[in-house]
Image (spheres, rainbow, N blue to C red):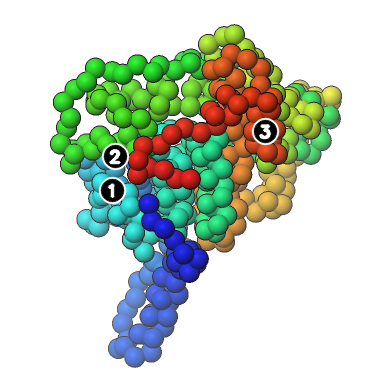
């Protein structure tokens, strides 16, 4: 990986601003000496358009089905952004993303790359979106931030506690905006549900529930699929696909979703939905920069019902049932309860009067925090204003640490105590070793 001096670091951080200043200065200078001409209003940022010099220039690194959806639904339609490049180790995905992007913009300008460092070296790119499988989210994010790019990463954002620590440190040291794809933090129904707790409408809250994916097993497979002949690296680069993970023989099934439920590639059934629901709970109860202090072993394949107390006296319980939709949360207080999940137009509440001023609750939150409804829009606003995104590095790392600690308790089949200040297990050397994983040569990020 590239080494940076403090001067290089500052230069990288300023790239996005320098590019815009240059374009603005160039336009002013040329306007003073060139012959009069007709300039489209869109080029000047009029009539509701965003001037090219103010657009966020983006590239994608590893856009699977989820990332393709993000691009199609959130990035391409948004005039604040301009998507210019796709990096993927799979030729079919590179070609598909390029075709979709070029069709949208009506040109042939989207560039394709196999090596991520080549696209990260482009000085015109302000931000990247990465949506690989779990194994590479942190690696790509850290490399991108070190190259001076802001980052939108899909979830689960890390494979280990150590990765999360590096993400937090890197974002701080390089002055980067980082948003993880826990999009429910930016959806009105979930926002209002969290606000009901924060505003005291539920009374004293001692218990919160986080929805757990109703499938899979915390103890994931470590078996290799049968070896198949390696494809041409231009069609699919297997070494790059593996990234930091331990080497194993190629099998095309891994690249078509077969990485799920594999220990080397996946954060388990807990990470699948817990990366969303834990973050919601952490945010609601004010534990954005902490994690539960105890993780009792649950002798079931999914750890359904694990009760995880925080130092502030609130206990989070992960549950597989209790909601009509997916990725739900439920908060229980001395004066009532509220719950939300995908498909809920508004939160469910114990007393309908809690939602009588629903719109005001939402607007007051947006005014107080500066966030906006819409997760990618919140990211874009943070990039432009250099503010902290809602799914920021700290909240992401701490809620993912909760995922990893719960996994480790299940793997070791014993209760664990966690020190959220030191970020280590208390008197358990074996558990502490599992806070990180070895990375293959050339893929280390620490």
**Are circles 1 and 2 on residues that touch, CB within 8 Å?**
yes
Residue occupying image coordinates x 47% and y 32%: 437
Labelled disc at residue 240: 2
Q: Nearer the viewer, residue 44 or 47?
A: 44
Q: CA distance from mark 2 to mark 3?
A: 33 Å
Check whether the beta carbons of the residues at disc 2 and disc 3 lie within 8 A of each other: no
Q: Which residue is mark 1?
A: 115
Q: Which residue is mark 3?
A: 291
Going by the picture, which residue comes out furthest to the top?
299
Residue density around tag 3, few if under 14, some if 14–19, many if 20 or more, within 10 Å: many
Who comes first in sequence, dot 2 or dot 3?
2
Q: How many marks?
A: 3
Q: Residue at x 59, y 33 (%)?
A: 401
As measured in the structure, the alpha-carbon distance from the residue carrying label 1 to the one carrying label 3 is 36 Å
Q: Which is nearer the eye, 303 or 33?
A: 303
Disc on the earlier residue, 1 or 3: 1
Dot 3 falls on a residue whose secondary structure is loop
Measured from the top left, where is residue 224 in percent x and y?
31, 18
State whether residue 164 is above or below residue 329. Answer: below
Residue 347 visible to the viewer: no
In the rendered structure, the answer to whether residue 319 lies left or right of residue 234 reads right
Q: Earlier in the sequence, mark 1 or mark 2?
A: 1
Depth order, front residue of 221/187:
221
């Amino acid at each position: 990986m590239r080494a940076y001096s403090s001067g290089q670091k500052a230069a990288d951080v300023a790239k996005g601003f320098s590019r815009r200043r240059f374009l603005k200065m160039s336009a002013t200078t040329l306007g003073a000496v060139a012959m009069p001409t007709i300039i489209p209003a869109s080029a000047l940022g009029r009539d509701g358009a965003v001037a090219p010099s103010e657009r966020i220039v983006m590239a994608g690194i590893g856009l699977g089905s989820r990332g393709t959806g993000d691009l199609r639904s959130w990035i391409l339609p948004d005039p604040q952004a301009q998507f210019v490049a796709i990096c993927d180790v799979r030729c079919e995905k590179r070609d598909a993303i390029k075709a979709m992007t070029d069709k949208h913009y009506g040109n042939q300008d989207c560039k394709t790359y196999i090596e991520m460092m080549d696209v990260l070296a482009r000085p015109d790119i302000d931000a990247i979106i990465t949506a690989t499988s779990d194994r590479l989210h942190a690696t790509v994010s850290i490399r991108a931030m070190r190259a001076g790019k802001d980052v939108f990463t899909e979830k689960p954002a890390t494979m280990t506690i150590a990765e999360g620590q590096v993400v937090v440190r890197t974002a701080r040291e390089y002055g980067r905006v980082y948003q993880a794809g826990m999009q429910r933090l930016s959806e009105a129904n979930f926002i209002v549900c969290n606000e009901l707790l924060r505003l005291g409408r539920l009374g004293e809250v001692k218990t919160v529930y986080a929805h757990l994916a109703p499938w899979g097993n915390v103890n994931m497979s470590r078996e290799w699929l049968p070896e198949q002949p390696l494809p041409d690296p231009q069609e699919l680069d297997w070494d790059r696909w593996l990234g930091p993970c331990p080497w194993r023989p190629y099998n095309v099934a891994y690249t078509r979703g077969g990485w799920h439920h594999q220990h080397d590639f996946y954060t388990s059934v807990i990470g699948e939905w817990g990366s969303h629901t834990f973050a919601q709970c952490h945010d609601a109860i004010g534990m954005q920069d902490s994690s539960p202090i105890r993780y009792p072993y649950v002798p079931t394949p999914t750890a359904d019902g694990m009760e995880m107390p925080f130092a502030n006296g609130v206990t989070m319980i992960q549950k597989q049932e209790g909601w009509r939709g997916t990725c739900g949360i439920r908060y229980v207080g001395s004066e009532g309860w509220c719950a939300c999940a995908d498909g809920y137009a508004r939160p469910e509440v114990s007393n309908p009067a809690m939602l009588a001023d629903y719109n005001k609750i939402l607007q007051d939150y947006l005014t107080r925090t500066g966030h906006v409804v819409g997760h990618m829009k919140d990211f874009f606003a943070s990039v432009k204003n250099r503010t902290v995104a809602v799914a920021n590095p700290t909240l992401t790392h701490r809620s993912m640490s909760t995922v990893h600690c719960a996994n480790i308790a299940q793997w070791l089949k014993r209760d664990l105590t966690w020190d959220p200040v030191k970020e280590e297990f208390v008197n358990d050397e074996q558990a502490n070793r599992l806070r990180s994983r070895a990375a293959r040569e050339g893929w280390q990020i620490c």
